[in-house]
Every structure is written in structure tokens, then in C-alpha cells.
Amino acid sequence: MSRTPSPPPDGAARSYENRLLLILFLAFGFVFFDRQALSFLAPFISDDFHLSNTQLGTLSGVLALTWALSGLLCGRLSDRL
């Protein structure tokens, strides 16, 4: 059973796909920088709030766990809808 390849999309569909890809790329980039912000701001946060390295590590771990759990929950919600 061989499948015939689908024809390439026309110009309008290709333009839509490229715009959607650009939007998703930018959104993922902003989320990535947001996730990494704590690492870059750690020296300033530790000085302002008088946190030890252990407390900063725990804060980073809680942030990563929160991102992971929210990704699972939002992914499940998006699959249902």
C-alpha cells in the first residue's frame, strides 16, 4: 500500500505557515528567556533578599518544577480543546 505524496501548498498557505512558524518561534524565545532570567538575576536577588546559595537553588528548582507541571497541565488542556 503506497501513499501518494500530497501536492505542495500554494503561496497563500505557505505564507500562512511561515508567519505561524515565526510567531511560535518568537513566543518560544520569550518563554526561554523568561525561564533563564532567574539564573542571570540571582546575584541581585540574593543581595536584595539576603538568600544563601541553597535557597537560590531551591528557588530555581521550584521554578523549574512549576514550569514542568504547568506544561503538562496546559498540554493536556490544549489536547482536549
Image: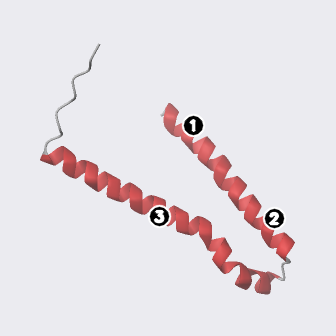
Q: Quadrant of residue 5?
A: top left
The residue under label 1 is: 76
Query: Relative to 66, is 18 on the left or the right?
Result: left
The residue under the point 84% across, 83% down is: 50
Determine the residue located farthest toward the front in the rendered image: 2
x, y percentage for residue 66? 69, 54
C-beta proximity under 8 Å, tags 1 and 3: no
Q: Earlier in the sequence, mark 1 or mark 3?
A: 3
x, y percentage for residue 35? 60, 65
Query: Relative to 80, is 58 on the left or the right?
Result: right
SS for callout 2: helix
Q: Earlier in the sequence, mark 1 or mark 2?
A: 2
Q: Earlier in the sequence, mark 2 or mark 3?
A: 3
SS for callout 1: helix
x, y percentage for residue 40? 64, 78
C-beta proximity under 8 Å, tags 1 and 2: no
The residue under the point 57% across, 37% down is: 76
Q: Quadrant of residue 61?
A: bottom right
The residue under the point 50% across, 39% down is: 78
The kind of residue tagged 3 is: Gly
The residue under label 2 is: 58
Mark 2–mark 3 Cα distance, whole angstroms, equals 25 Å
